[in-house]
Each structure stands twice: as structure tokens, then as C-alpha cells.
Image (cartoon, rainbow, N blue to C red):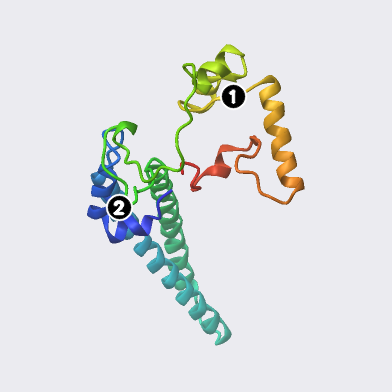
Amino acid sequence: MLDPQLLRADLWNTANRLKTRGKDFQLELENFRRLETERKVCQSRTQQLQAWRNAKSKEIGIRKKGGEDVSALLSDVERVNAELQDAEVKLKRILEDQQSLLLTIPNVPHQSVPTGQSSEDNREERRVGTPRRSGFAPKDHVEIGNKLKLLDFDAATKIAGARFTLMTGSLARLHRNLCAVSRQRGQPARHGPTAKVRGRSFQGSEKEN
């Protein structure tokens, strides 16, 4: 999730950089502006009410010690407490709405990333070695995995969306064993086993990267 301070400090530039992701995303500028304006007003009012209540509570304590009648002050504090409670509820709702919006915003592409509409527009940075030449037409790993029933793209799409797959059978066991060997040797595995966790645990993370 993007840091909201990035949007608050440089909204236009951030929005323009997000446009380079293509047609799959469009930042809701007006919605963000509206929520940000509401947040500022409500947060400022909440802080003013809190400061006033704290000051009056201190004054009540001092006047009570002096034997003065504080009934009028207590009535004012009760009224302000009710207004403060309403303001805090409203502020919480605004922050939740803003959080929901922020969670829909993808990461900003790095400035070095070329602008394009699909993976076909990617730029080749470097090539290491020489591609191996075979005396036959090599098959794609997806085709091999599907034929051997070791990869299940249909089930993965239902669970996690496009561009994911589930490993099954001997391939899943091989994957787990390779991870286990890597851990035993003290070398972090590049692709660890899948862990089932609550969705909230991933909120605000950089799982998209």
C-alpha cells in the first residue's frame, strides 16, 4: 500500500506515474481529495475539542479544590464530550474509507520502467549466456505441467486470480523438499511454501511486488 503522505505531498506527480501502468488502473483523484479534505477538517475539530476538554477538566479540578461551584463547567464538558464522540466516530469512518481507497492503489512504477500496454513492451536489460539449441521443439513448462497434471492453473485462478498456479503431486513434494534442503543449509529459499493466513495480515504489505 502506498504511503498516504506520498499522495498528500505530491498527488499530481504520483497520479501521472500511476497512469503509466496502463488502462488497468485510474487513480480516483476527486474521491481522494474529498476524503482528504474531510479528514483534515474533522481531525482538526477533534483535536480542538480534545484540547478544550483537557483544559476544562484541569480547570474543574483547580476550582473544586478552591471550593467553587463547577456545575456549569461540568455541563459544558458533558456537551463537548458528546460532540467529541460524534467527531471521533466521523473521523474513524473517514479514515476507514480512505484506507479502503488506498488499498486499491497499486505500487508506483519505478521511473526506469518503460511505459507499455503489455508484457510485450518490456525492455530486455541484458542477456546472459547463449540460448540452448535442441534437435526438437521444446515444450513450455505450462504445457508439460498440465499434461502431467502437476500444475493446476484453473484452481489457482479461482483462489488467487490470474497468473498463479497450484503445484500438485510429485512436483509439490519436490518443491517442499527443495525448500527444506535450502533451510537446512542456511540458505533462504527463493520460493517458500504457501502459508494460509488471514487476509488482514497482508493489508498494507507489498505482496504485489
On the image, the x and y values in percent for residue 110 come to 34, 51
On the image, the x and y values in percent for residue 208 come to 46, 41
Between 100 and 155, the one nearer to me in the picture: 155
Picture residue at 30% right of the left edge, 40% below the top: 21
From what the image shows, is residue 186 above or below residue 60? above
Q: Give the spatial CA distance, label 1 vs label 2.
A: 33 Å
In the picture as drawn, the residue positioned furthest to the bottom comes out as 66
Tag 1: amino acid: Leu
Picture residue at 74% right of the left edge, 41% below the top: 181
Q: Which residue is mark 1?
A: 166
Q: Residues within 10 Å of mark 1 (few under 14, many from 20)?
A: some
Q: Quadrant of residue 28?
A: top left
From what the image shows, is residue 91 above or below residue 138? below
From what the image shows, is residue 54 above or below residue 29? below
Q: Residues within 10 Å of mark 2 (few under 14, many from 20)?
A: few
From what the image shows, is residue 22 above or below residue 159? below
Q: Which residue is mark 2?
A: 111
Between 51 and 137, the one nearer to me in the picture: 137
Between 151 and 6, the one nearer to me in the picture: 151
Picture residue at 46% right of the left edge, 56% below the top: 85
On the image, the x and y values in percent for residue 2 come to 40, 51
Which secondary structure lies at badge 1? strand
Between 30 and 17, the one nearer to me in the picture: 17
Picture residue at 28% right of the left edge, 52% below the top: 14
Point out the tag, 1 or 2, that comes first from the N-terminus.
2
Tag 2: amino acid: Gln
Which secondary structure lies at badge 2? loop
